[in-house]
Image (cartoon, rainbow, N blue to C red):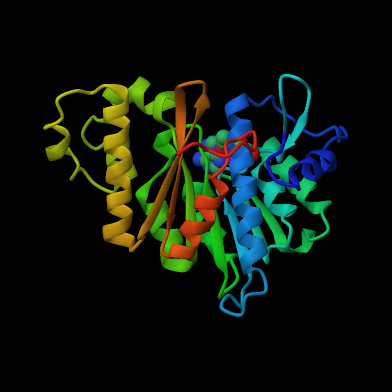
Amino acid sequence: MAVTDRWPELLEAVREDDSLLCPPIKPHTLHKLTFLHRYIDITTTAMVGNPHWPGGVAYLDLFCGPGIGVTKSGTRVPGSPLIAGMSKKPMSAIVCCDLDEERAEACKRRLDRLANSKTSSVLHGDSVQLVERLVSKVPTGALTIALIDPFKLELIQFDVFRTIASRCRADLIFLFADSMDLNRHYQQYIQPGNRIDRMLGDGEWRSSFDELDTHAEEVLCGFFRSHLEDRLRRELDYQFFGQRAIGTGNRRYYTLMFASKSERGFDFWHKACAKDADGQQELF
Ligand SMILES: C[S@@+](CC[C@H](N)C(=O)[O-])C[C@H]1O[C@@H](n2cnc3c(N)ncnc32)[C@H](O)[C@@H]1O
């Protein structure tokens, strides 16, 4: 798969069985990882060593997983923390967290084997509870890439964004679980005081939601995605946004959302998304 020149190199680095947890991954997860890999390579290549960022480029992964997964055809693929750990130019810090002990431990042991292992730390626990501790490990003066990649939308809470943005100059990549989660469970999600309120910070969205003519999937999910962007813009001063649909065929499973305070960050994201997951130029 021609993703970037280095993708085969990364696959080769994780090819051998290391006897640690290696869960199956779906084709759409592979798409997500290839975009993340491109974005990280483009950003670290341009920004590591840039005097504007004396703390280097740091990586924060709140839902890190075990670090390697396996496709249906048996190819072992690096997960998000190892993609960061094997970036072209090294990150100044890699800070990860997973609720599952075995996943956190596998991630830690795999990061420990990499050349720049001294810069990595993995916490085991609920990242929503631990977010203060996680951000405290990011070096001062770093440009931070923060990945927030939960299976469920309810784990995206506005306060987590607030904590990250108040302590780090972070570009955010977060998984918005459209048809995987929101569309299936939206009746529960929109109960007063429920998950959407936590995701958006309060229930201000309700008055415009009541004006929607339909709750068809694209309308419903598009509504909450744009509300979340609006909130990040108004409350945390994010100014540049990107969205990348992830799915197979015409089916959108989820959206990778991107937010930055800098046009340059957006430019990196745009370049990372300019090709599809197979490395072909996108036709837009
Ligand atoms: C989609 S997977 C992450 C995959 C990983 N980012 C990657 O791309 O390789 C989601 C992970 O979140 C973890 N998780 C679920 N709830 C969590 C929580 N509250 N805090 C931290 N991790 C959590 C799960 O154990 C799982 O490993």
Q: Is residue 81 left or right of residue 159?
A: right
Residue nearest the viewer, comparing 172 with 193:
172
Q: Quadrant of the C terminus?
A: top left
Residue displayed at 27% across by 44% down: 227
Ligand 1 falls in quadrant: top right
Above/below status of 29 relative to 10 = above
Measured as percent of width and height from the top left, residue 112 is found at 80, 53
Estimate the x, y position of residue 257 in percent, counting from the top left: 44, 44
Residue 49 is at least partly visible in this image: yes
Residue located 47% across and 26% down the image: 253
Relative to 56, does residue 103 appear above or below in the rendering? above
Q: Quadrant of the N terminus?
A: top right
Q: Nearer the viewer, residue 123 or 231?
A: 231
Instruction: Give the total of numbered labels.
Output: 0
The image quadrant that residue 26 belongs to is top right
- Observer-nearest residue: 120 or 262? 262
Q: Residue 66, how many percent across, how many down?
A: 69, 38
Q: Measuring 62% from the left and 43% from the top, which residue is drawn there?
A: 64
Percent across and percent down for residue 110 are 78, 46
Is residue 143 depicted above or below 267 in this figure?
below
Query: Residue at left 49%, top 58%?
Result: 267
Q: Is residue 95 visible from the viewing direction of this image?
A: no
**Is 6 on the left-hand or right-hand side of 134?**
right
